[in-house]
Image (cartoon, coloured by chain):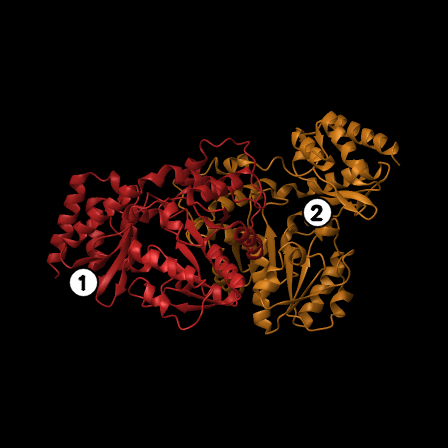
Chain colours: A orange, B red
């Protein structure tokens, strides 16, 4: 095994983890189903109370006319953009250079749709109003991702967001929210999901990130938008005969965790301080604005991997199972969920003390 | 409530059913998970033992190099055709006029792909070698659906199938099998799934029809084909972080029912005889060649619906929950699974006697 494989293996063996909600195993599904009666009828091709009740619940929660449950956000967002392009009779859309659509979907949007994405601003920072004002071409839709995951989950100010929303609506540009992690930004903005969503014309949110479900997404918009989305869902092969395993889990973990977002956010800030106090570590952003941030080491992965591995073996606390090499060293992403709360405070303090000591000997 | 709603409602209330495996409810999933350890790790974006082991199991079973698990057959087949078109540098494909791709997918293939389907032969009969020989244009791929669901699950002879396969391979036409119901045709052909699949270059099979799983499909081909399929699966939004709820259920019901296909087939033949013995009823095909057939009444739905409703209420046996009007009357589709075996033989005989008596009074 090489350094990184050993790091991964040592991470998997730890009982405690800094990130997420615990292991992604079949127990997640079994727990969600525990109190569901076996006679509850399956959804059938988008019909049935399991799916329609949950879609209505989400529409109410977001303050939208309608909602469609999707197996994935990839599918939901390509479809959202296509609907806006059709409505505006314009195949241009605009999004951040590190949007999920641009870097994680094998160019599905460009291959499956006649849509041309225009990249907004710079990869290293969040999209600004000026980026949208300076677009070289008219676009049907601007997609904003909040928080911007690939740069540590950064956010524009809410004032900037309101200005972007006002500008887009003045110019008849549809504003779509990639809100995969929308739940996680409510504490920083001090706004409800409904208040954030009200700035947009359509929203996608995910059930397996901050909420810790199994898979699946919700797409919200006006009724005609959602009816069109259902036709596209059928075209993409997403109108499964039964989506209930994902829906029941989404519903269960939504109820279980929707009110924990402030705890995750505050814990993320506390952990970021602890990381920043270690020699050669910086976090991005320095002060998290959601439950997530990136941890950067000013040392190469070859140095950091064995160090973390040893620390994980000794402490029984998982810091990271991987490291990505960067120009100035290496790093990983950390999203805070339920798991960290299980770690005794003294052991956490001890972990960061030892991490700092170890790093000091290499800096 | 109108006639058809009352028919549906009476069907749902029956304890026994002629068709399928029993109610599609959450119990299907809970049963499949019963003996699965909660600590079994989820699949992650196509990786992990749950998905790779099952894909390998299916590849072995079909005698193919590789397999990819898909959330739906709609997605799997559009992708299969696209890969063949790319390999042959030709965007023409050919399939039956009542192919699932043509009538049940909101034209996804044509909207999402640059593919032009050419319809083979006539809607009312199965595709023949002559239909393929008479194609007006060169095609990259011929898709055959076995059995041809929309015409009662009819099949060509195995000799015809071999001739089609030989012809396609001589002419460098890829032959893809829409084998949603492939398991169900092995008793009629007296061939294994492997023997049938060997005539094709790629195969799709479904886990929630004859096998009674929850959702999901397998796509089989050579290794390069399956690697390409995984990229397309990502593009379509089908590469879910976790597909295990469907995979575990598919695996469970595959093991449970794969050896029952002869029973379903023989029961279907027996039921078809009983239906054909009723006044004004014919089945398509007259003698089933799989576990399915269509039941046609030479009477309008307005007449048949209340009659079936009353019979269902009286017998506690579900015959059908719907009726489709046709030129010469009305009908429904029947696919035999586990459910029918629960009905006491005498009650089944009594049911058909009463059905016949009722119909005689209207003919």
* Chain on which label 2 sits: A
Q: Secondary structure at mark 2?
A: helix
Q: Are marks 1 and 2 in contact (CB under 8 Å)?
A: no
Q: Viewed as shown, does residue A164 lie left or right of A252?
A: right
Q: Is B171 rendered above or below residue A240?
A: below
Question: Which numbered disc covers residue A121?
Answer: none
Between residue B128 and residue B291, name the one nearer to us. Answer: B128
- Residue drawn at point x = 43 percent, y = 42 percent: B250
Task: From the top left corner, tell me how far across and down residue B70 is, in percent.
Answer: 49, 50
**Crowd tier of the residue under label 1, counting other residues whose Cα lies within 10 Å: few below 14, some 14–19, many 20 or above:** some
Between residue A210 and residue A54, name the one nearer to us. Answer: A210
Can the viewer see residue B169? yes
Task: From the top left corner, tell me how far across and down residue B245 is, in percent.
Answer: 49, 42
Task: From the top left corner, tell me how far across and down residue B258 is, in percent.
Answer: 36, 40
Q: Secondary structure at mark 1?
A: loop
Q: How many marks?
A: 2
- Residue drawn at point x = 72 percent, y = 45 percent: A292
Which residue occupies the extreme front position in the image? B170
Report which quarter residue B169 is drawn in.
Answer: bottom left
Residue tagged 1 = B298
Report which quarter residue A134 is drawn in.
Answer: bottom right
Between residue B206 and residue B346, name the one nearer to us. Answer: B206
Residue tagged 2 = A187
Do the residues at discs 1 and 2 belong to one chain?
Answer: no
Q: Is A218 rendered above or below residue B247?
A: below
Q: Viewed as shown, does residue B169 lie left or right of A223?
A: left
Quadrant (top left/top right/bottom left/bottom right) for the C terminus of chain B: bottom left
Task: From the top left corner, tell me how far across and down residue A363 is, in percent.
Answer: 89, 36
Q: Is B241 rendered above or below residue B84?
A: above
Whole-Å distance between the Cαs marked 1 and 2?
66 Å
* Chain on which label 1 sits: B
């Amino acid at each position: 095994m090489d350094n990184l494989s050993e790091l991964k293996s040592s991470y998997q063996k730890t009982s405690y983890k800094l990130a997420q909600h615990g292991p992604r195993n079949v127990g997640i599904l079994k727990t969600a189903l525990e109190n569901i009666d076996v006679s509850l009828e399956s959804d059938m091709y988008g019909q049935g109370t399991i799916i329609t009740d949950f879609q209505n619940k989400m529409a109410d929660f977001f303050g939208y006319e309608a909602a469609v449950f999707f197996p994935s956000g990839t599918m939901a967002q390509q479809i959202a953009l296509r609907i806006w392009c059709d409505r505006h009779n314009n195949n241009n859309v605009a999004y951040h250079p590190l949007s999920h659509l641009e870097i994680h979907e094998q160019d599905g949007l460009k291959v499956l749709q006649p849509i041309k994405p225009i990249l907004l601003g710079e990869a290293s920072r969040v999209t600004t109003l000026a980026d949208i004002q300076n677009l070289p071409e008219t676009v049907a839709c601007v997609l904003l991702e909040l928080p911007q995951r690939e740069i540590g989950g950064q956010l524009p100010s809410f004032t900037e967001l309101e200005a972007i929303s006002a500008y887009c609506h003045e110019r008849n540009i549809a504003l779509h929210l990639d809100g995969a992690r929308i739940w996680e930004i409510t504490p920083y903005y001090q706004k409800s999901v409904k208040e954030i969503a009200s700035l947009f014309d359509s929203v996608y949110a995910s059930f397996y990130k901050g909420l810790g479900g199994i898979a699946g997404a919700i797409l919200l918009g006006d009724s005609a938008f959602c009816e069109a989305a259902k036709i596209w869902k059928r075209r993409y092969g997403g109108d499964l005969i039964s989506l209930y395993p994902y829906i029941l889990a989404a519903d269960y973990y939504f109820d279980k965790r929707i009110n924990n977002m402030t705890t995750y956010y505050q814990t993320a800030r506390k952990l970021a301080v602890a990381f920043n106090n270690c020699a050669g570590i910086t976090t991005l952003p320095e002060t998290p604005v959601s439950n997530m941030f990136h941890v950067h080491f000013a040392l190469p992965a070859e140095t950091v991997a064995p160090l973390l591995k040893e620390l994980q073996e000794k402490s029984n606390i998982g810091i990271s199972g991987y490291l990505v090499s960067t120009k100035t060293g290496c790093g990983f992403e950390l999203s805070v969920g339920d798991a960290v709360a299980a770690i005794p405070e003294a052991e956490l303090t001890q972990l960061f003390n030892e991490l700092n000591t170890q790093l000091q000997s290499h800096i």
